[in-house]
Structures are given as C-alpha cells and as structure tokens.
Amino acid sequence: MHDTVTANYLWLIPALPLLGVLIDLTFGQRAGRGFVSLIAPGMVIAAFGVSVTAFATLLGLPEGTALLDNVYPWISAGSLHLDVAFRADALSAVMILVVTGVGSLIHIYSVGYMAHEDDFARYFTYLNLFTFAMLVLVLADNLPLLFVGWEGVGLCSYLLIGFWYDKDENASAGKKAFIVNRIGDAGFLLGLFLLFWNLGAGPHTLAFSEVAAHVKQIPLGVVTAIALLMFVGATGKSAQLPLYVWLPDAMAGPTPVSALIHAATMVTAGVYMIARLNFLYVLTPTALAVVAWIGALTALIAATIGLAQNDIKKVLAYSTISQLGYMFLGVGVGAFSAGVFHLMTHAFFKALLFLGAGSVIHGMSGEQDMQKMGGLRRHMPITFGTFFIANLAIAGIPGFAGFFSKDEILLRAFTSENGSAALWLIGAVGAGLTAFYMYRLLFLTFYGECRADKEVAHHIHESPNSMTIPLVVLAALSIVGGWIGMPAHWLWGNQFEHFLAPVFGHGEVEHVSAALEYGLMAASVVIALLGIAIAYFFYIVQPGMPMLIAWRAGRLYDLVFNKYYVDELYDAVVVQPIQRGSTWLWRVWDATVIDGLVNGAAETVAANSSLWRRVQTGNVQHYALSFLIGAVVIIGYYVWR
C-alpha cells in the first residue's frame, strides 16, 4: 500500500445509486414509469461521472497514490476500530468504471426491455440497490466493509433472480442462489475471523494497508488456511467448482439482471477479492495452486456443458462460469493484472452477449430455445452485428478485446513460476470449446431458416433504440477495450499491467521472449479457429451431423446434456439427507419431545385443575363444611400431638 490523498467526494459514488433507491421507493409507484426511467439510470450515470473524476485525479497523482475518503467512525469494540472509509487506487478505479459504466448501459437497456413490466419501480429499486452494494464492495478500505457490500450484492441477487416471485421456478432459483452463496460466505467469515485473531495485539482497523503490513508475521500455515477459507467464499460468489450450480438457475431472472449481476459485476467479486488480497495470496503457493487448478477445471468443465445446451441464456451462463474460471486461473498463477484485465474485457463482451440474447428473446416473443430460432440476422441486423462482434471477442480472435486478455492469462499460465504446461493446455482446450459453443449459438440463432412457430416468426422484429444503442456501445468496447493491454512487443505494450503494477507489485511484470509469446499466441488462435470451423461444418455445412453424433455418443451425450448430473448428485447427497434429517427432527424431536413436554405439562395442570374444580362448587354450605372439617383437623392435631 502507498501514499494516500484525501478525496472527500468518493462517498458520492455509492451514495448516488442509494439515493435512487430511496426516491424510487418513495415516489416510484405514484410518479410513474417516466420518472423512474429518468431517476434510476440517471443516478448510475452520475456515479459514473464521479468515477471518471476520481480516475482522472488518480492519473494526475504520483504512481501508486490512492484516494481516501474517511466518512465516519463505524465500530469501536475492544481492540477493533472500524471506519466507513472508501479507497480508490488503480484496482478499485478500474472496478468502479466497469460497474458504473456497464451498469449505466444496462439500466438504459432495461428501460426498453422492462417497458411492459407492471412492477417497474420495484425492478429499478433493486437494480439501484445492487449498484450501491457493488460499489461499496469495490471501494471499501477495510475487509468488514467489503463484506457488507459482499452480502449486499448477494441479497440483491436473490431479490432480482426471484423478481417474478409468483413463478415457482424463479422463487426456487432465488432461494438456491441465496443458500449456495451463504455456504461460501461462511468460509469467508471464518477466514476473516482467523485473520483478525492472528493479527496480534491491537488496535486493529482491518484496513487493507494494515493487513498488508502485518500479514507476514502470521505463520505460513495459518496464512494458507485464511487464503483457502476466503477462496471458499469466492467459489460461492463467483460460481466455481463445487459451488457453481446456482448460476445457471439464476437465468430465471430478467435478462438485463443476468447481464449486470450474473455476468459483468457481482460474479467477479471473488476475483476482485483475491486480487485485492494479493499480498496475502503471494505468501502461500499452496493456496495459489488451489485457486489456479479450481479455475482451470471450472473453465474446462463448464465449457463442455455449454456444448450441449439449447437454452440461449443457459449457454451464456455456462460460458460465464467458464470465463470466470479463466480469471481465477490468472490470479492463481500470480498474474493478478491479467485476471483483472479479463474481468474488464469480459464485462464488455459478456454484457453484450446477454443483452443481445435479451434482444433476441424480446424479438422472439419470449422464446429461449435455440432449436426454435434461426435466420434472425435478416430481421435483427443490429442485434446480429453486435452479437457477432461479441462472439469474435470471446472466441479470442486477434484484434478483439477477449484475445488480449485471454492470451495474457494463457501466457502467464505457461510461463509463471506458479503455472505449468498442464494448466496452459487445459486453458487452451477450454478456449477451443468456447469458440465452438459460441459459434454453435450464433449459427443456430442467426443463420439458416427460421424454425419458430408461424405466429412467433410473423412478429420477429428488431429491438427499440433504448436497447440497441447500449449494444452498439458495448460492441465498440468489445473491440477497443482490449487495446490497452497489448502484448509486450506490440505498439505501446501492456499499459493495463503497468497501471496496476503499484497494486500488484512491479515484480509481476515478467519478461518473456517474443518467440515463446508468439508461439503460444499462435497456438491459442489456431485452436480457436479450429473450434469455429468445426461449428461451421456442423451447423451450416452438415446441419444433420450434430444429431447423428449425439445419437452415436449415447450416454456420453446424455451425461453432458444433463450437466453431469451434478444437481441430481447434490440433491441425493446433500439436499435429501438434510430434508430427511429436518423431517426427523420435526416429527421426533420437535413434535414428539418438545411439544410432548410442553403439552404434557399443560395436560397435567389441566387434569389437576379439573379435579380441584369439582371442589369449587359455588355452594356456601359446602364451603362452610370445608372450613369446619379444616378447623376440626387443626384442633385435632394440636389436641392429639
């Protein structure tokens, strides 16, 4: 951590979307759609403006300087003293530009996409609330405040996945995301507690600069445990093995939500957290290796599942899981800037792909099955053109954003002291699969003859400007967004890596021979082109071939089509035993033991009361006789004792 300069305006960046929440919540229903359409996107655009100001200020300061806004004292308990403080250094500056920039475009797109939604104000209230929480997460100056944002985005994800809560599928998907994320969050919290416990005598603020200064005093084994526990949180939030299962189901939410939360921003929180704690992870090669291998295996397995899916949003969901795997592969081999670079370019082209899919679904009257699409490029030229650019970017075609960031990760996976040829090979194979399934999606959706019902085909149309303009802007970013991170021997080189060097250390900038770099680059491009060529042959030249291969593959195809039965496995191994255990506890312990004791006590009292109630007859003669008998007994006692 380096010098800081006070910037008393940083709090405005998260506060503006929060103000949008309060206004929409208070006046949204009465003021109408026009008012909400102005306020909700307007607040995020204003936050983007403040973010640009912070970024420009940062560029004018000496290298490594950070902006700091200490808003107010938050918690003071024993040796723990926490402040609500926001920090903008090179890393968080990149993140706030991505969150507010891409977020603004998705808010504008949502105005058109959700135009016929009855609960318009509630949707934008949730969307603004998510933006606020995400900005708290990336601007937080200490770990507990980061965790507040971490939990906030999890809550908003639950609210937005289940936005149409009257449908069982959506409500269940929201609950699944919420529960799986809580499993990961438990690991994050344990790691946080373990870190605090081992910092030694206080006082402690858990600010990142303080943790970085003290972490080398912690035994290596404990550092590894802390890093792994926090990575458990990252696997939940960023949908990695084994906690990725919530993300495909989260596609039940509105498509702009999928673009903003489940592609461009929230799911990258785990990558950001590890990059932010890079000073901790570099101390433990074991934890880095776990991160890299989990990322690589997730990238490969999710890509294979994407090969056989027919729901356009599910394909993109598994693609997101796979691309997140690449980011973890990058940070896992110690190439933190490469991981963050792919996070940024992925936000551009994946948001574009999701919004393009939303445009397709909008034009197809809600249809999501690619087998019922085809020939849409003639009806939706802007959507097709921008989707085509996004495909080139994610496939890693030279000149497009995804090429530069993915190539950088694969290069570091091969050359880094934490990398290996095996990790590079897994990444390269995954890149080939990515090119194949993305062009399968493109050919099935936009090429050939339309396979939709006549009624649907008759109404296919291009989306309104409020939806297509964000597509065009994101398409431009999917091209030029990667030029800031050129290979070392091209033009201005990798300026992105140099910009982040003060955060990750200049030691990360490795010098690789041009021959090796070009060789690996050529190999990854050839693999990607091969994937595209195979997809072209299967879905344009010989469209009957995929069905024949699927038939011949038999159980292997069923295995991939059914996502390796992981959901069924979790249901059998985790969900059903817990449900059976809960049912047993309910029937035996709660209903029989607890209720039995309570009801038994009540029945005993009732029985005694019923017995003694017979004495309370209300007859004065009976009471007088009782007094007489009592008096005789007492007198008799004293006479005969």
Image: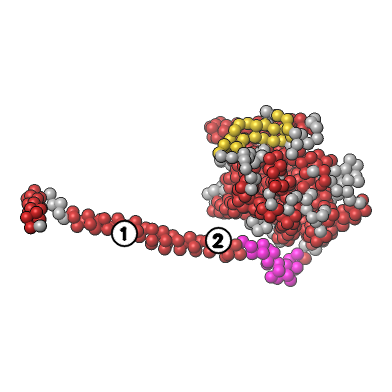
Image quarter hosting the N terminus:
top right
x 44%, y 60%: residue: 586
Q: Is residue 466 visible?
A: no
User: Pointer 1: what residue?
Assistant: 600
Answer with mark 1 or mark 2, whichever residue precedes in sequence. Answer: 2
Rendered image: mark on residue 311: none
- Is residue 143 shown left or right of residue 278? left
Image quarter hosting the C terminus:
bottom left
| Disc 2, SS | helix
Q: Nearer the viewer, residue 504 or 31?
A: 504
Amino acid type, residue under disc 1 in the picture: Gly
Rendered image: mark on residue 575: 2
Q: Nearer the viewer, residue 195 or 473?
A: 195
Amino acid type, residue under disc 2 in the picture: Val
Neighbour tally class for label 2: few under 14, some 14-19, many 20 plus, Cα within 10 Å: some
Tell me where residue 235 appears, x and y as whole percent.
Answer: 66, 53
| Disc 1, SS | helix
Tell me where residue 141 appears, x and y as whole percent.
Answer: 67, 38
x 75%, y 55%: residue: 285
Residue range in magenta is 546-567
Q: Is residue 523 visible?
A: yes
x 82%, y 46%: residue: 507
Q: Main secondary structure of the magenta part?
A: helix
Distance CA(mark 1)–CA(mark 2): 34 Å
- For the view shown, which residue lies furthest in the front direction? 641
Report which quarter residue 299 is drawn in: bottom right
Tell me where residue 430 appears, x and y as whole percent.
Answer: 78, 58
